[in-house]
Amino acid sequence: MERKLRYVWWFVIVGFVVFAIWRLFLPHGSNAYLQKTASNREIVVYVTGAVEKPGLVHLNSDARLDDALKQVSPLQEANLESMNPAEKLKDGQKVSVPYKSPPLAQGSAVIGNPNSAGVSPASQSVPTPAASPTTAANPASVAVPTPSGGKININTAGAAELDKLSGVGPALAERILQYRAEHGLFARAEDLKNVSGIGDKTYEKMAAQVTVSP
């Protein structure tokens, strides 16, 4: 009986020792193993922006931002001061490396001295004055200067010059231009009578002031 009791106590003691070892040592060992396994696990991040080699970067799960930057080679224009190189990265994370100043978009205007931006003065575009509605609609209304003190050439004069003729106002000047555009140049000064609103009396007032010769 005493012998059996002794065996029982031995089993109890051995079981307690085994339990103590499992309780005290194995959890720590398993945690260390899990941590080591996690540190060896790979993550993938996407790096873009002011870098030479944008794209996917494969890193260890405990990698920092500095590890990713070393693989993509930041440009000189990269604003690294605004980033935290010690930041811990996560799988699937996107990292955008900013520029020190936003790059100029293609076709954007250069303000200031064009030579300082590598633009030659000859390459600058000079704005073309917009044509007035009257000129665009009726090219015949463009005035051609007449010799000083000479008669007004009704084949080349514009509305402003025709308005200077005796008996002619802005409305009648426009009708003269319209007639010239529809029927061509005047063959004789007397052909002005064919314009609506110009009769014999009106023509007599301007006869000495007009010509069809250059």
Image (cartoon, grey):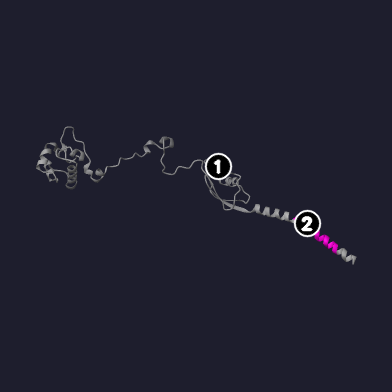
The amino acid type of the residue labelled 1 equals Ser
Crowd around label 2: few <14 · some 14–19 · many ≥20 (10 Å): few
Residue 58 at what x, y percent from top left? 59, 51
Total marks placed: 2
Quadrant of the rendering where the N terminus is positioned:
bottom right
Report the side of 124 relative to 46 (left or right).
Answer: left
Asked if residue 133 can be seen in this view, the reply is yes
Which quadrant is the C terminus positioned in?
A: top left
24 or 64, nearer to the observer? 24
Query: Which residue shows up at 24% across the image and 46% down it?
Result: 137
**Where residue 21 sits: x, y (%)?**
78, 56
What amino acid is found at the position of numbered circle 2 in the picture?
Answer: Ile
Q: Position of residue 104 (x, y in %)?
A: 45, 42
Mark 1 lies on a secondary structure that is helix
Q: Which residues are magenta?
A: 8-25
Q: Quadrant of residue 83?
A: top right
Residue drawn where x is 86% and y is 64% of the image: 7
> Which residue is drawn at the image coordinates 19% and 38% (left, top)?
161
